Amino acid sequence: MRILVTGASGLIGSAVVAHLSGLGHEVVAGVRKSPALAGRPIVALDFATASEADWRAALAGIEAVVNCAGALQDGPRDSTAAVHDEGAARLFSACEQAGVRRFIQISALGVDRAPSTEFLKTKRAGDARLEASRLDWVIIRPSVVVGRAAYGGSALFRALAALPVLPVMPGTGLLQIVHLDDVVRTVAFFLGPGAPARVAVEVAGPELLAFTDVVRTYRRWLGWAPQPSFSVPGALARLMFRAGDFLGRLGWRAPIRTTAEVEVRRGSVGDNTLWREMTGIEPQSLAAALAAEPASVQERWFARLYLLKPVIFGALAVFFVATGLVSLGPGWETGTAMMNEGGAGRLGPFLVIGGAVADIVIGIGIAVRRWSRAALYAGLAISVTYAIAGTLMLPRLWLDPLAPLMKILPIVTLILVALAIREDR
């Protein structure tokens, strides 16, 4: 079949694309923008802006659609209503007009049980629109999905497992973790000839696990000894989730935001009986799925780096902004004196002001995701410029007890690390 998979760069979507291609299907990857996807055919459309006409053009020759697009929480880059409801409705309508019958929707467990967040409410609204359509629809409602690849919540499990002490959030619900392979096999089943249609199934793992049990299972998989735990006070937990919201407003998709807070408290538990009976799939336990793919050193690197990423970007942003403010404030006389000593003359004050403003702009740019790459490169360039200018004007600073020029080297190194780990997926 020729199949369009939307959300093809995401955790579930990318796995669906790979699996269906391996089965011999011709898969078109639907993405928001055009990344490198191993030379696959690509349709670059944004759910927020794509019209029915845009979707109809993309559906030429398509026999089935698998919609894996999703957004956890509203932010500068995401709109839950656009992705799950309004934008999805335009895709449903375009499928009807283009003659595409089979439509598989990746939804979420619990959307039909008093949804409490915009994530679940918009997911439910989109499901309702699909159910009212003339399409041969299938709605797959998975629990928390984990796989070899990691993103968002699945990445957070690994990151928490890497900490020396496990923070235990108050009031977390039980989870029926489902492995990504089982979700992908479910999609393939419903694309098969004679597969049932107009049905919604809950896809959930075989065991009820506490959040801490999941993290400890990952820690064993990563090959580390058990970690002690401590209970996070409710006020601190709320502060952490709201800090995640702040990062979200800056464009970073933090896994701990207020939507995640509600979801963690709610848990993710369902009835997998219909799914198992209909497909014949017996879900894997988390421990068994992890044991089938032993952790590598790359996994341990990722786990340790995941929570360091916001620390690195935050430290660089604060460093550049603070440096600029200090230069314009308490460090003004020292800065202008050094410029005079270096022979800058009347240009000295202007050079101090220019450097300070540049530092502040770079720091703000690093903090905002859409500007961060350019800001990091600017930070790299200005750091090298400072090193060269300082060497030419005041070479003694290399031997100064506080080593102001020497400290440029670790800053440059940290910028290179930030550039290397900037990508979300």
Image (spheres, rainbow, N blue to C red):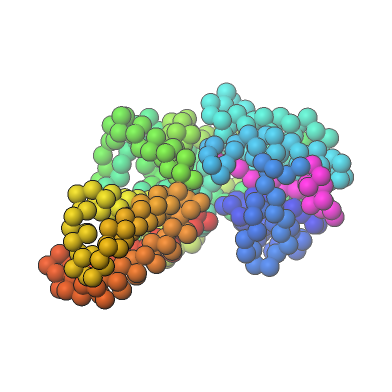
Q: Is residue 230 above or below residue 24?
A: above
Q: From this viewpoint, which residue is outermost toward the left?
A: 401
Q: Is residue 192 visible?
A: no
> Who is closer to the viewer here, 320 or 229?
320
| Magenta stretch encompasses residue 346 | no
Q: From this viewpoint, which residue is outermost toward the top?
A: 114
Left/right placement of residue 310 relative to residue 406 reads right
Q: Residue at x 72, y 55 (%)?
A: 43
Q: Residue at x 19, y 49 (%)?
A: 330
Q: Is residue 307 above or below residue 243?
A: below
Residue 162 sits in quarter:
bottom left
Q: Is residue 378 above or below residue 116?
A: below
Q: Residue at x 26, y 67 (%)?
A: 344
> Who is closer to the viewer here, 149 or 189?
149
Q: From this viewpoint, which residue is outermost toward the front?
A: 346
* Residue 126 % position (x, y): 68, 33
> Who is closer to the viewer here, 190 or 419?
419
Left/right placement of residue 117 relative to residue 359 reads right
Residue 23 sits in quarter:
bottom right
> Who is closer to the viewer here, 336 or 153?
336
Q: Residue at x 43, y 52 (%)?
A: 365
Q: How many marks?
A: 0
Q: Is residue 238 visible?
A: yes
Magenta stretch bounds: 52-72
| Magenta stretch encompasses residue 69 | yes
Q: Quadrant of the N terminus?
A: bottom right
Left/right placement of residue 405 relative to residue 29 reads left
* Residue 4 % position (x, y): 74, 53
* Residue 86 % position (x, y): 70, 34
* Residue 298 % position (x, y): 42, 65
